[in-house]
Image: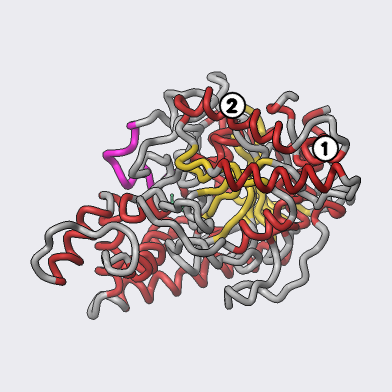
């Protein structure tokens, strides 16, 4: 079986019709991981026993002639910020280097309940802080399309595993762009749902008001199948929304004719690579040929998005990361003489440089005397950014932009310049701040064959429209 052509439906039907078994499929993926991943570095932990057990369960169903669930027998993998019962979950950090959770993240549990086979846990930036996966405490990930380059981040392992055919689909998390940006860099599809659409229960928190779980996949339909599986209210997460989940897959086939597509000049500003601009403009023309109406919209507060994001995200991170104190779980420094020395040294030895930088920035922004000037002001600007989108979405059904200002950069290129690294998220952080859904789909490549991503943003809880638009575009360029 050609692993590189395998979609969810193809894998499931092969297992259902017994042209292969789920166990055989799992073994071919592990063989591929064994062969390729030394070079790429996408996986941190494999969970072979758990995978084979689930695969056998699916094979038994198929052998009895029973219909498989929607992801029956399909090999998937999970970003290592999502808890997996009995399987090491590190968040890419040394401080959780030997953490074995006693429970499953809801999104993972829902995938498995739908028959998916979890192969293992994927590398990422430490606590999902980064844009290149170079902040992993273990090792960086390389971009399968050009191994001298980064796969993006923080879900670099999730994007690279799909791009290198080491899983059919994966889960990632997006706080400021971490699903869409690596999807764009690796040439795969990445979807960030509306805030509250997918439960965050069992997701190791970075910035709670910005964190989202979503799929990375080879095509739009697979992303729709995964979203349909993991979305919906979960009593374990009070911020998960009580909003009905449409059948995203059935919605894909509805026509897109007449949809109004917004284009904002603020997303085509200085710093945008010319090849990226050309590819995105060509994609917009294609949407016009598909009888969408292109409408110009304005998102005037976009220029404040990066500073706003880095205040809100670091403030929330500083609070969330206070729990890692060496007492309850995770790394504990040896031979400390007092309790406070144990706290201090555990955190000093356990956290990496970027995480410490963010804890310090966030603590400062929240401190008495500075709270109003930074945190409170950032929250106000966040509201203005959300209002920009509310206004724009009165006129249009979706907005298209480049996902990133540049294609994948070289490993090491930005590690010593955190500000340059932060700017890689310039087109993605706005959707997280506004709570709206967004996705990245491939829309071409540069002369050097580096993938370029088209970002499609939608109204709150209207993933169906952006998926439909993405699917129609994907089918049109394929033909
Ligand atoms: N690159 C951004 C950051 O470093 C976004 C990360 C994310 O979405 N998890 O915070």
Residue 366 lies left or right of residue 279; in this view the side is: left
> Magenta span has 420?
yes
Residue at the image point whose x is 45% and y is 51% from the top? 88
Residue 214, given in percent of the width and then of the height, sits at 61, 54
Pointers 1 and 2 in contact (C-beta within 8 Å): no
Which residue is farthest top? 447
Q: In this picture, is 461 found above or below 241?
A: above
Q: In this picture, is 235 found above or below 140?
A: below
Residue at the image point whose x is 85% and y is 42% from the top? 63
Can see residue 409?
yes
| Label 1 element class | helix
Residue 341 lies left or right of residue 133; in this view the side is: left
The answer to which of 269 and 322 lies nearer the viewer is: 322
| Residue 31 marker | 2
Can see residue 286?
no
Q: Magenta part of the protein: which range?
A: 412-424
Residue 356 lies left or right of residue 150; in this view the side is: left
Q: Which picture quadrant has residue 476? A: top right
Residue at the image point whose x is 52% and y is 27% from the top? 34
> Magenta span has 145?
no
Q: Which residue is mark 1?
A: 289
Residue 37, given in percent of the width and then of the height, sits at 49, 29
Q: Which picture quadrant has residue 477? A: top right
Residue 360, given in percent of the width and then of the height, sits at 25, 62
Q: In the picture, which quadrant includes the N terminus?
A: top right
């Amino acid at each position: 079986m050609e692993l590189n052509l395998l979609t969810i439906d193809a894998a499931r039907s092969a297992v259902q019709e017994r042209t292969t078994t789920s166990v055989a499929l799992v073994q071919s993926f592990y063989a591929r991981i064994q062969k390729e991943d030394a070079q790429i570095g996408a996986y941190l932990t494999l969970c072979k026993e758990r995978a084979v057990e689930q695969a056998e369960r699916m094979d038994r169903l198929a052998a009895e002639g029973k219909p498989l669930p929607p992801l029956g027998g399909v090999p998937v993998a999970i970003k290592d910020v999502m808890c997996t019962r009995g399987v090491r979950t590190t968040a890419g950090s040394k401080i959780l280097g030997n953490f074995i959770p006693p429970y499953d993240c809801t999104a993972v549990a829902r995938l498995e309940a739908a028959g998916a086979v979890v192969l293992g846990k994927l590398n990422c930036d430490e606590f999902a802080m980064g844009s290149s996966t170079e902040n992993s405490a273990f090792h960086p990930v390389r971009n399968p399309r050009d191994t001298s380059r980064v796969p993006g981040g923080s879900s670099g392992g999730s994007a690279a595993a799909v791009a290198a055919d080491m899983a059919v689909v994966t889960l990632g998390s997006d706080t400021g762009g971490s699903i869409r940006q690596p999807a764009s860099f690796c040439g795969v599809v990445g979807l960030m749902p509306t805030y509250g659409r997918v439960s965050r229960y069992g997701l190791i928190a970075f910035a709670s008001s910005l964190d989202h779980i979503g799929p990375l996949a080879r095509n739009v339909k697979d992303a729709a199948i995964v979203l349909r599986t993991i979305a919906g209210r979960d009593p374990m997460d009070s911020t998960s929304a009580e909003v009905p989940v449409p059948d995203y897959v059935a919605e894909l086939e509805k026509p897109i004719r007449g949809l109004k597509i917004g284009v904002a000049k603020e997303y085509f500003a200085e710093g945008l690579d010319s090849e990226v601009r050309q590819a995105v403009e060509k994609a917009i023309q294609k949407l016009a040929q598909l009888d969408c109406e292109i409408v110009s919209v304005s998102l005037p507060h976009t220029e404040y998005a990066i500073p706003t994001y880095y205040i809100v995200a670091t403030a929330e991170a500083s609070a969330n990361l206070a729990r890692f104190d060496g007492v309850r779980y995770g790394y504990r420094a040896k031979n400390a003489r007092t309790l406070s020395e144990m706290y201090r040294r555990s955190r000093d030895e356990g956290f990496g440089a970027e995480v410490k930088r963010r804890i310090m920035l966030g603590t400062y922004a929240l401190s008495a005397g500075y709270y109003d000037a930074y945190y409170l002001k950032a929250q106000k600007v966040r509201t203005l950014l959300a209002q920009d989108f509310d206004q724009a979405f009165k006129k249009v059904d979706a907005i298209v932009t480049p996902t990133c200002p540049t294609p994948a950069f070289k490993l090491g290129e930005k590690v010593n310049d955190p500000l340059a690294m932060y700017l890689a998220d310039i087109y993605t952080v706005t959707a997280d701040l506004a709570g709206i859904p967004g996705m990245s789909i491939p829309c071409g490549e540069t002369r050097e064959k580096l993938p370029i991503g088209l970002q499609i943003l939608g109204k709150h809880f209207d993933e169906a429209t952006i998926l439909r638009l993405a699917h129609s575009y994907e089918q049109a360029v394929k033909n």
